[in-house]
Image (cartoon, rainbow, N blue to C red):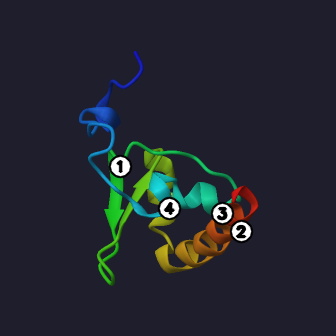
Amino acid sequence: NAGEGIWKAVVPRPGTMKGEFENNDPIGLYAGVKIKADCSLNWVNPDDHKLYCFSSATSLVFFLDAPASYLEKARMRWRKLQSVAG
């Protein structure tokens, strides 16, 4: 069943968590695509205290290998995606 299992045991109510990149997964942005996340899997940057939301545990684990590198590229791609949409 969708939304069940250990990774989705607690899903925040829609709109209650505000992550960077409008709750899009940083690894998705790194790859050049927007992937909305519900913020049930998240990480807070210890340097600037910003919240980042992930669409899967795999994405979060992958990201944690080199967060600064992935965030730098995700920010660049986010700006590019925003300028195309806007």
Quadrant occupied by the C terminus: bottom right
- Mark 2 lies on residue: 80
Indicate whether 55 appears above or below 42: above
User: Whole-percent x and y of residue 52?
Assistant: 40, 62
Give whichever of discs 4 and 3 has the lower sequence position.
4
Q: Which mark is residue 41?
A: 1
Distance in Å between CA atoms under marks 1 and 4: 15 Å
Asked which quadrant contains residue 81, the reply is bottom right
Picture residue at 64% right of the left edge, 64% below the top? 30
Q: Look at label 1 and name its amino acid.
A: Leu
Q: Look at label 4 and name its amino acid.
A: Phe
- Give left or right: position of 63 versus 28: left
Give whichever of discs 3 and 1 has the lower sequence position.
1
Picture residue at 48% right of the left edge, 73% below the top? 67
- Give the label, 2 or 1, closer to the camera: 2
- Mark 4 lies on residue: 21
- Mark 3 lies on residue: 82
Q: Are marks 2 and 1 in contact (CB under 8 Å)?
A: no
User: Whole-percent x and y of residue 37?
Assistant: 46, 45
